[in-house]
């Protein structure tokens, strides 16, 4: 694996569908919970330590060889919102499609995953399987998942609030330390999953993300799918 492979997988321009999603930021802006850079930072930290930790742990576990079917079921069990489950599977399906077109070396693994989940596996599961196929380590894919959890929301908020891009970048810089902590914790959890099963995966509560996703799914005039 080269560093360029990791950078490509983590690049926001990689055609994995993330540009169409705000990670709950649009719902938070509509509710008035995010109105400026300070609110965005609080939102990102909250998302990172709940949904982000789960995504990073699942991706790292899949990269270490944990059963994708069991991991997918565990994500379902930890995602109460139907809207979030649908969004995650759509993103997973698009990520798998992009990976198939980018890395022929993973054709067998990608084919198995596609047949097992014809409507799409959860994004974090697909991310980990792709990482394993192309030689990205569990630690690196955990960092990728954790960073993606906040970078998408920050990018979306620039559009939603006409937020100064420099301010959005400043938010990402300030939460970078937390991204590293979450990624390191995720790798520890992933090793536990391999040894003890998916029951050790975190289940941090983020009720406003869940409620916001359900409201957003029926909202008129949305800029983002989620």
Image: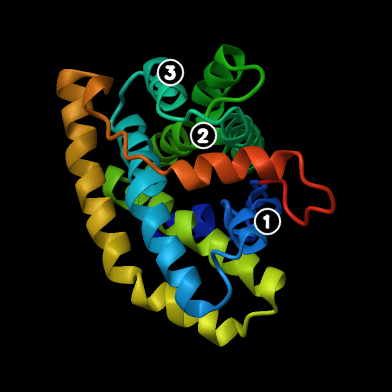
Label 2 neighbourhood size at 10 Å, few (<14), some (14-19), many (20+)?
A: few
> Residue 129's spot in the image, x, y percent?
44, 32
| Residue occupying image coordinates x 37% and y 16% | 70
Between 177 and 195, the one nearer to me in the picture? 177
- Residue placed farthest to the right in the image? 221
Asked if marks 3 and 2 touch (Cβ < 8 Å), the reply is: no
The numbered mark, 3 or 2, whose residue comes first in the sequence reads 3
Q: Earlier in the sequence, mark 1 or mark 2?
A: 1
Residue at left offset 68%, top offset 56%: 19
Number of residues whose C-alpha sits closer than 10 Å to that of mark 1, classed few (under 14), some (14–19) or many (20 or more): some
Furthest-top residue in view?
116
* Circles 1 and 2 in contact, beta carbons < 8 Å: no
The dot on residue 73 is 3
Secondary structure type for disc 2: helix
Task: Using residue 8 as the reference point, say whether residue 2 is left or right of it.
Answer: left
Find residue 206 and report its image quarter: top left
- Mark 1 and mark 3 lie on one chain; the one further toward the N terminus is 1
Is residue 169 depicted above or below 34 in this figure? Answer: below
Q: Which of marks 3 and 2 is in front?
A: 3
Depth order, front residue of 54/1: 54
Residue under label 2, please give it: 105
């Amino acid at each position: 694996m080269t560093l360029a492979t990791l950078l490509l997988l983590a690049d926001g321009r990689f055609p994995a569908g993330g540009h169409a999603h705000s990670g709950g930021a649009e719902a938070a802006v509509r509710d008035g919970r995010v109105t400026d850079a300070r609110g965005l930072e609080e939102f990102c930290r909250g998302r990172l330590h709940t949904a982000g930790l789960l995504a990073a742990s699942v991706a790292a576990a899949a990269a270490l060889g944990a059963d994708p079917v069991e991991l997918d079921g565990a994500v379902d069990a930890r995602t109460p919102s139907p809207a979030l489950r649908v969004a995650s599977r759509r993103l997973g399906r698009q990520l798998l499609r992009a990976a198939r077109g980018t890395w022929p070396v993973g054709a067998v693994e990608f084919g198995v995953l596609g047949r097992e989940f014809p409507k799409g596996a959860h994004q974090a599961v697909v991310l980990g399987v792709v990482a394993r196929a192309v030689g990205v380590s569990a630690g690196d894919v955990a960092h990728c998942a954790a960073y993606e959890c906040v970078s998408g929301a920050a990018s979306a908020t620039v559009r939603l609030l006409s937020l100064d891009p420099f301010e959005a970048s400043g938010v990402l810089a300030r939460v970078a330390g937390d991204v590293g902590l979450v990624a390191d914790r995720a790798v520890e959890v992933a090793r536990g999953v391999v040894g003890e099963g998916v029951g050790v995966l975190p289940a941090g509560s983020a009720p406003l993300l869940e409620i916001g996703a359900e409201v957003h799914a029926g909202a008129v005039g949305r800029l983002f799918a989620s």
